[in-house]
Structure formats: structure tokens, C-alpha cells
Amino acid sequence: MPRSNCSVASEVLRQRPRGRRAPMRGSGACAGRVWPVGLFSRDRCEGKTPEQLAMMRTAGLLVGRTLELLVREVRPGMTTLELDTLAETHIRDHGGIPNFQLVPGYRHTLCTSVNDEIVHGIPGERVLVEGDLLSVDCGAEVRGWNGDAAVSLVVGGREAGRREDLELVDDAEASLWAGIGALRVGGGLYDVGAAVEDSLTESGTRRGREYGIVEDYVGHGIGTSMHMDPQVPNYRVSGRSPRVVDGLTICIEPMVTLGDQDNTVLEDEWTVVSKDGSRAAHWEHSVAVTEAGLCVLTAVDGGRARLGERFADIAAG
């Protein structure tokens, strides 16, 4: 997928007023995984049957367990390609297919984004060092159904991290859960982005900083394909919001920087970096919304610990 398509979408987006913009209808896809604003027909929300949700839970569990493995194993001195190989082996050994490899032109299992890389970092010979801020994005397909999730962490453990990096990681994760908590059948899909932005504004104010909420890339629906309708902004937008339907499955994925949100794509036509060199964090979960409540398909516990009474279990099938 040509880099220029992403650049065009981003340029049109930046011509609009910042901070309260409506999702766009655009053309073309970025050479990456988190699709740029405008790729989807924003209004189409379709639900899954209980049987389909059970199959999605299977795929989501595999993604969640793969990320747990990577978080345990990552250490200074490893290359990002070693992490990628570990993830691919685990996914294939457990009956899955690394679905990032199904994206045209991409041949890896993960996206590994380090420090000022926001998303779509390509695994390679880069050696991780203590204190690096690493985001790992992972997906898997099992029997035709998909899961997609991302985590951010400090290489070498929290004791190796700068205070501002640890706060960024924690606050970005908290904003993800705020967005998840805003989901309810019959509610507005754009309530998700509003909750994400409000969470980051509140945490930034508490810490005496203003986070950069990346607006050029959005979350997405997920199911028989990794990227489906609807688009899911990770920030507050104006305009009519689609209604959340029973059985909707989406990916929410805030991308947050310590500086400005402006970004650019490197010459590899995949890696998105902050223009001002500020470090970034990226968190993501695949989530199912039903009349009974919420299930985080890519969380090993389904989100039980974070959702409380709103948790509704979906057994893998």
C-alpha cells in the first residue's frame, strides 16, 4: 500500500479544525495497520451472533496470551525481530495465523514501535536497550476470525523507566479502559473517543502536561477481517454518531505522545513517528458489546478485573 495514500489522507485531515473534528470519508489506505481516518463507511455497525462471538473470543485469547508471553520475555539485548519470531511461533503452535502477514506488503507478525515511533514499527535487527519505550501490536486469525491488541512497556521493567514514560504508559492504558467503559448497546459509538480524550485531558492536567492524542489514525471494527467498519475515533468528534448494536466488535486503540500529535511516515513506508521526536504509547483491545455487558476479547480475563459489574463473559468456542 503506497505511502502517498496515507500522506494525502493526513494532509486533508490537518486542514480541518483541530480537536473536535468529524471523522472523514476518504480514499486509500496507509501503508500500515491502524488505518488512517476516512478508510471506512463510518455508519455501518453490525453485530455478531453468540456463536461468532465465541469464535472471536478464541482468536482474542490467543492474541492476549501471545502478548503476555512477549511482556514476560522482552529484555535488554533482544532484537525486535527476535520478539517477532517468538510471537509467530506461539501463534502458529496454537492453531492461529499471524494476521498482520495477511496485510499486503507486510511479512511480520508484530509491529514493534520504539520510543518516538508511534505505530507500525517493523521488526528487525534493532537491539532493545534498557529504558526503551516499546509498543507491541499483535494480531491473530483462528478459523477465519480475528483478534488484534497492543501493549506498551518500558524495556527492563518499570524501574528502568523515566517518570514521564511510565506516566505516559499508564495514562494511555487508562484512556483505553475509559473508552471501553463508554460502550453500551444503544449508545453512541463516538462516546468512546470522548471518554478517551477526557481521560487523557484529566490525567495530563493532574501531571502538569498536555498529551498529544494522535488523530490521523483510528480504531476499527473487527471480525472475519482484521479491519472492518466502523471507524472508531480515539478522540472527541462532532457530528452524528452511529449507534452501538448488540454483538458489535471493535478495536479501540489510543495512540498518545508526550509532545505534539503531528507525525510522519518514514522511508520504509510503514513506521509512523512523532515529528517533534517525543515518545509515544499505543494500547489496543478488541471488545465485544452485548446486551449483557462487555467482554474484552483480547484480555486473558476478558476484562473482568477492570469492568466489574459490566463484565459479561464470552466463552471461547
Image (cartoon, grey):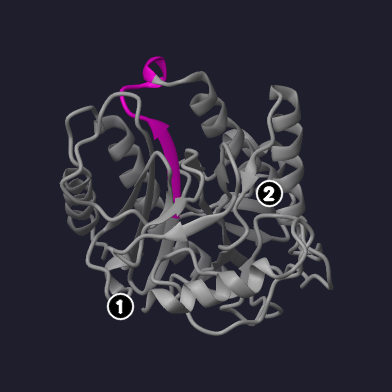
Q: Is residue 161 visible?
A: yes
Q: Which residues are magenta?
A: 149-160
- The residue at 47%/59% (across/down) is 264
Q: Is residue 184 above or below residue 242?
A: above
Q: Hey, which quadrant is residue 126 in on the image? A: top left
Q: Residues within 10 Å of mark 2 (few under 14, many from 20)?
A: many
Q: Is residue 219 left or right of residue 148?
A: right
- The residue at 36%/60% (across/down) is 266
Of residue 33 and residue 149, the one placed in the foreground of this image is 33
Q: Which residue is mark 2?
A: 179
Q: Amino acid at mark 2?
A: Gly
Q: Secondary structure at mark 1?
A: loop
Residue 140, horizontal then vertical, whole percent = 34, 61
Q: Amino acid at mark 1?
A: Pro
Residue 158, horizontal then vertical, whole percent = 42, 20
Residue 156 is covered by the magenta coloring: yes
Q: Which residue is mark 1?
A: 104
Of residue 57 and residue 123, the one placed in the foreground of this image is 123
Q: Is residue 303 above or below residue 154?
A: below
Name the N-terminal-most of marks 1 and 2.
Answer: 1
- The residue at 33%/34% (across/down) is 71
Residue 315, horizontal then vertical, whole percent = 48, 54
Residue 248, horizontal then vertical, whole percent = 63, 68
- The residue at 21%/55% (across/down) is 88
Residue 37 is covered by the magenta coloring: no
Q: Secondary structure at mark 2?
A: helix
